[in-house]
Amino acid sequence: MDTATTVLFNPIGLNLAEVTRMVEVARALRNHSGMRPVFLVHDKGFDHLVTQAGFTRLPGATPFTDEQARQVVAFDQGRTLRHPFTLERVRERVAVERAAIRDLGAAAVVHGTNPTTPISARAEGVPLFYPVPYALSAAHLASGRGLPILPPHGPGRLLNKGLASLAARLVGGAPLLPSSFQRVGRENDVRMRSLGDLLGADHVLLTAMPDEVGSSPLPAGRHRVGPVFARLDAPMPGIVDELVAGERRVVYCAFGSSGSPELARHALRALAEAPVEVIAPLRQYLTPEEESRLPGNIHVTDLVPAHRLEGLVDAAVLHGGQGTVQTACATGIPFIGMGLSAEQRWNVDVWARRGNAIALSPRALRGDARRFRDALCRLLGDPGILQAARQVAREHEGVDGAAECARIIADEVGRSRVPTRGRPSTPTA
């Protein structure tokens, strides 16, 4: 008889960081005796990484089309108010998720920023866990540390703090959720009114280092667990060893799943003119024709096990997603970060203040890209930046955010084995 305790993982499949974060936590949870992680992923994109990692996976609801997936990314980055979460889609996904929780007898659900998960888990009365970056979380907004909307100089610093206070009030109480979530919430006896209801959980697991969180104590239900980033079980492309054996400096350029073809083209054009070799896992953003026209110092690949690049590359050019930033920090690689959203700008700014990163706007890649090229020269030539990167890497040694997430999940599940169905929704955001 199978006596394993099942925990359902529900990431949004089109987001690389969310899928890999869930995979790492599930791997760590599998090390706890009697724990059985199972995945439910609706959308295409990076869902294959779940299968490659060897986890049981249930069929999801109707996936987004490619155009709808692009719309979700734009909505997440604040570039549009349009979204594909229609009433029918939200209703279908909640029905599939609730059925999975019941059929599995799941003791808990781990939320991977799949926006229907909070409705499903609360409707079924099971504990909800949410491993998530600190930036723009309720803990961040309540801290008064400001949002990286404007340059943090002069009046920008005060305005950023004011914006954080306003955002905290809006997230906590304003009825900003799309009506489809509010209606399906009511249909399932779950309050879904504010963004706090959508982004909250019984246990919010902040995947951050102390530099990011600061010294303020965290409220009950929020835990700082440490970095959780991808450790892809994939071979290193052969070109990496070839480039490392050469005489030129090697730069890694990656934009996760929130980049764009335009950003990739601008970045590679600027890097093509630099005296460096470039490893660029950007194939998803380029057409075969564009890739064939790239100069000889640009080497486009599929996904790279970036956690193994320590000592192999000299610098990185990143979009600012927490996973890519944490990987660079943990491996001692200095980087240029060009945040595409407020959260990503925050991720970069934290380490720019520590000295192992340089923060730029994506606009620095346009025109003659002089600001970008100057920053790259500084990154490769300033020994102080490399020294700071090595110090940050030492601070990351021995910190295992995935293992800490798994410990908290296993401990809490052990304490709450008898769920109360349909409990009121008073989540921690």
Image (cartoon, grey):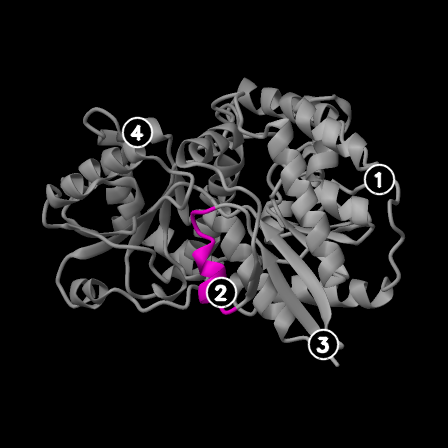
Secondary structure beneath label 4: helix
| Residue sitting nearer the eye, 262 or 274 | 262
Which residue does the numbered mark 2 point to in the structure image?
394
Q: Is residue 338 above or below residue 39?
A: above
Mark earlier in primary sequence (4, 2)? 4
Q: Which mark is residue 34?
A: 3
The answer to which of marks 3 and 4 sits earlier in the sequence is: 3
Q: CA distance from mark 3 to mark 1?
A: 29 Å
**What is the CA distance from the residue labelled 1 to the residue labelled 4?**
43 Å
Crowd around label 1: few <14 · some 14–19 · many ≥20 (10 Å): some
Q: At label 2, which amino acid type do we have?
A: Arg
Residue hosting label 4:
364
Q: Which residues are magenta?
A: 44-54
* Disc 4 + disc 2, Cβ < 8 Å: no
The CA span between labels 1 and 2 is 39 Å
Please rate how many residues cluster around mark 4, counting C-alpha atoms within 10 Å: few if below 14, some from 14 to 19, many from 20.
some
Classify residue 281 as left or right of residue 46. left
Callout 2 secondary element: helix
Q: How many marks?
A: 4
Residue shown at 45% from the left, 47% from the top: 44
Q: Position of residue 173 (x, y in %)?
A: 78, 25
Residue 295 on the magenta segment:
no
